[in-house]
Image (tube, rainbow, N blue to C red):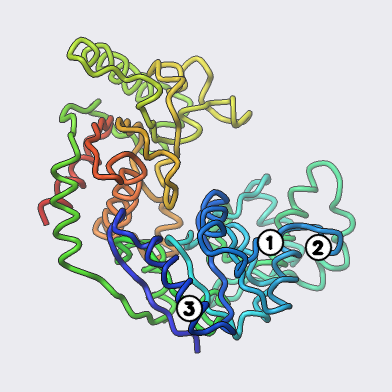
Amino acid sequence: MTVITVIDRPCGYGKSTELIAELKEHRTNYPDAKILLIVPELGEVKRFLKEIGDWFHEPTPNNEATSKTDALIELLSNGKNVVATHSLYERIKKFQHLLNNYHVIIDEVPTAAKEVRTSFGTGVFKDLLHGRQFINIDPITKLITPTSNWLMVEDDYTIGTDVGIQRFMDSVTLNDVFYVCDSYQVMPLPEAFFTKPASLTIFTFMFEGTQLDYHMKTRGYCYDLVTCPDELIQFKQEMTNNLNIHQQTAGVKCGYSAMTQKEPKSRNVVGKFIRNLSGKLQKDGLALTPDRVLVAGSKDAWYGTEKNPSSKVTNSNRLKRTTRLSKATYTAMVTRGTNKHKHLDILVLLGKLNMNPRLADFLGMNSNKAQNSHATSELIQLIYRTAIRDKKQIFLISADPENLALLREFLAA
């Protein structure tokens, strides 16, 4: 059985630095140990490789391995120590048989479950996939599996709009995809993630109440939680000292639906709020210049059709234009494990962290307490992508008042 440990320590308190030191020590004391290290992004892969040297390897395509996944499988087959990104580890079903002797270390919480997007509507799902019995849905677990009926006709679905059906069925074949409703299916982290490695260690902050915490508890995966209460007290005090919050908000809800719908009313309110505030702050000596500002919000609301041709947000009312912060650095509301924004000392929140209600239902997170815990955790992670990570003063602006309420509640607890 996999031994699972969660190391829960505040942002900026040296988790990664201490991990690097422990890996170096491990090399001396346990040279035959097999370790798979998973980090959030490619920049962190390079950082760890630079620090821990040639004892670890990065999956790189070659003549024999034409993809990163194949390269990872080749390294694991040869018993090598590997450092890779979260995106590669999500394909665990392809190499789970190689993990029995590996100690897996994950820096930052991976995504607990993702929506499996489809290009077809509920009619196709009901009338075709259900009606012709191309899929089977387990009545208890709701796991979707392809049937022999699909295997006999799959070659007929390779052109035109049928390609979308083929892609969905490929996802069902290669991954554990669960049925929620005819228009929404999810792909959670596979069981192998929690059961195949010799040990699994997750380094993060504010783990309790996250999506992964709920997912693990719902499915009976037990873990040991290692925390340091004194560090948390110190962290909150430092955060209070270094976080300057602008108390005025746009006074509208800035969740995903409100910010990405066709009707631009809420977006226009937010855009005008930031635009007017920017002018006022400049008069007071605080200019929202691109070299200082990190903007966070919905990708669709910010970019409109620039990044998503099917977006309901037009270029004329996208936030990138209406806020007049088009040259600022953009990031998603859920942003973890990166240090590339820590030179920025002004954070502008144009969104509110809310969960898709169907995903919340799947994870057992329907209560306000559960969703607020998730939102608070991600909000703190986002704030600590900025200069506050280096214990520097930052200025926070939030269009949505609920963000500020969650922050106050966290700091006061």
**Which disc number belongs to residue 299?**
none
- Does the rendering let one see residue 196? no
| Disc 3 target residue | 26
Q: Residue at position x 60%, y 85% from top? A: 100
Q: Earlier in the sequence, mark 3 or mark 1?
A: 3
Q: Position of residue 148 (x, y in %)?
A: 81, 73
Residue furthest to the left: 412
Q: Residues within 10 Å of mark 1 (few under 14, many from 20)?
A: many
Find residue 243 and report its image quarter.
Answer: top left
Q: Nearer the viewer, residue 329 or 192?
A: 329
Residue that numbered label 1 is attached to: 59
N-terminal-most mark, 1 or 2: 1
Kindly report the distance in space between the C-alpha atoms of the residues bearing marks 3 and 1: 21 Å
Amino acid type, label 2? Ala
Residue at mark 2 to residue at mark 3: CA–CA distance: 29 Å
Which of 332/273 is in front?
332
Q: Residues within 10 Å of mark 2 (few under 14, many from 20)?
A: some
Q: Secondary structure at mark 2?
A: loop
Place of residue 354 in the rendered image (x, y in percent of width and height, measured from the top left): 36, 47
- Furthest toward the front, the residue is 28
**Does the CB distance between marks 1 and 2 fall below 8 Å?**
yes
Q: Residues within 10 Å of mark 3 (few under 14, many from 20)?
A: few
Q: Position of residue 142 (x, y in %)?
A: 56, 71
Residue sitting at x 21%, y 28%? 249
Rendered view: 270 above or below 182 = above
Task: Decide if residue 85 is in sight here.
Answer: yes
Label 1, secondary structure: give it.
loop
Residue type (three-letter) at the residue carrying disc 3? His
Disc 2 target residue:
65
Say above or below: 289 vs 400: above
| Relative height, residue 330 to residue 51 (above, below) | above
